[in-house]
Image (cartoon, coloured by chain):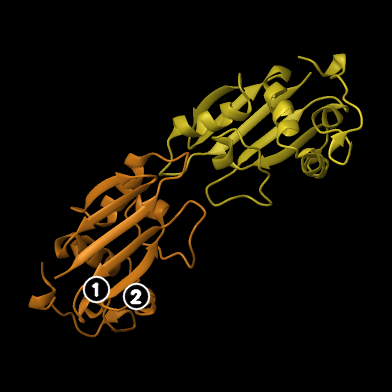
Chain colours: A yellow, B orange
Amino acid sequence: MIEVSLRAAVRPTESPEKVAGALEALFPGIEVDAEGGFISGRGGAASLAAFHRLLREQRILDTARSVMLQGVVADAVQFRLNKQAATVGRINFPPEEEPLGSIHVEIRGGPSLIDWLAPRTVDGKPIEEIELEDGDHV
Amino acid sequence: MIEVSLRAAVRPTESPEKVAGALEALFPGIEVDAEGGFISGRGGAASLAAFHRLLREQRILDTARSVMLQGVVADAVQFRLNKQAATVGRINFPPEEEPLGSIHVEIRGGPSLIDWLAPRTVDGKPIEEIELEDGDHV
């Protein structure tokens, strides 16, 4: 079972609606909620479909795989996304927490999660595209 | 004659109204305008009254004087203010342009402008408080 959790700070000059829109631009179908200066998002495997496609369209599979492998914590993978780039559907992995606050992503799932999202490539092209394992689905 | 010009970027997740509010929190009475991804502000000597007071209340005269003396360009003084801190009426001089964009301030005025805003101090207390010269007033 896949569980996607997102969290992004809303700075004083920011619009909570626009921050929520940034989350929804990369993870359509995510359920967003405002809570004390943060926008959070929750969803299942379906909310990863667009992100899976965008990683390929934007040709950043190698970067994504590297970032995700560095972010493995127990049965989850954690990484950051740039909130401003997200508003226009662009995936950008900032090297560190940004002053405006990044989007914090945690995805819990089976062992094939990273191989499904960001497989190994040759010259940037996936060696093999796998399906999510049954156990990975919601 | 004093001319105050402000300019602050509005990032994709930001609210133009909240950015304008940040300008107005430090410079009440400033006339704000939105133009292509920026909020600008224009005002005269009266729009500096609150800023003059806040520099004293927040005990940052020495820092302010140093920043302003470094920012003298011809008959103007230019410096940056942190946009997030401004929303709550707090003056903070960021060392460089911030990722969210800072508030850019330019004040044109007579030679006594900096001595009026941020006089020399001893132990943080002004040696002398001057009035703006007649020629400095709007």
Which residue does the image show at 49% across and 28% down from the upper left? A34
Circle 1 Cα neighbour tier, 10 Å, few/some/many (<14 / 14–19 / ≥20): many
Res. B117 mark: 1
Left or right of A127 on screen, residue B118: left
Q: Position of residue B89 (x, y in %)?
A: 31, 54
Q: Which of pointers 2 and 1 indicates the residue nearer the eye?
A: 2
Is A17 rendered above or below residue B45?
above
Which residue does the image show at 81% across and 42% down from the upper left? A62
Which quadrant of the figure has residue A63?
top right
Which residue does the image show at 62% across and 29% down from the upper left? A26
Instruction: In this rendered view, identify the residue nearer to me: B36 or A9.
Output: B36
Which residue does the image show at 41% across and 66% down from the upper left? B93
Circle 2 Cα neighbour tier, 10 Å, few/some/many (<14 / 14–19 / ≥20): many
Q: Calculate the distance from the C-alpha at mark 2 to the C-alpha at mark 1.
A: 9 Å
Q: Position of residue A58 (x, y in %)?
A: 70, 36
Residues indicated by labels 2 and 1 sit on the same polypeptide chain? yes
Left or right of B94 on screen, residue A72: right
Instruction: Identify residue type, mark 1.
Output: Leu
Res. B68 mark: 2
Which quadrant of the figure has residue A49?
top right
Q: Position of residue A131 (x, y in %)?
A: 86, 19
Left or right of B20 on screen, residue B10: right
Disc 2 to disc 1: CB gap under 8 Å: yes
Q: Chain of mark 2?
A: B
Instruction: Identify residue type, mark 2.
Output: Met
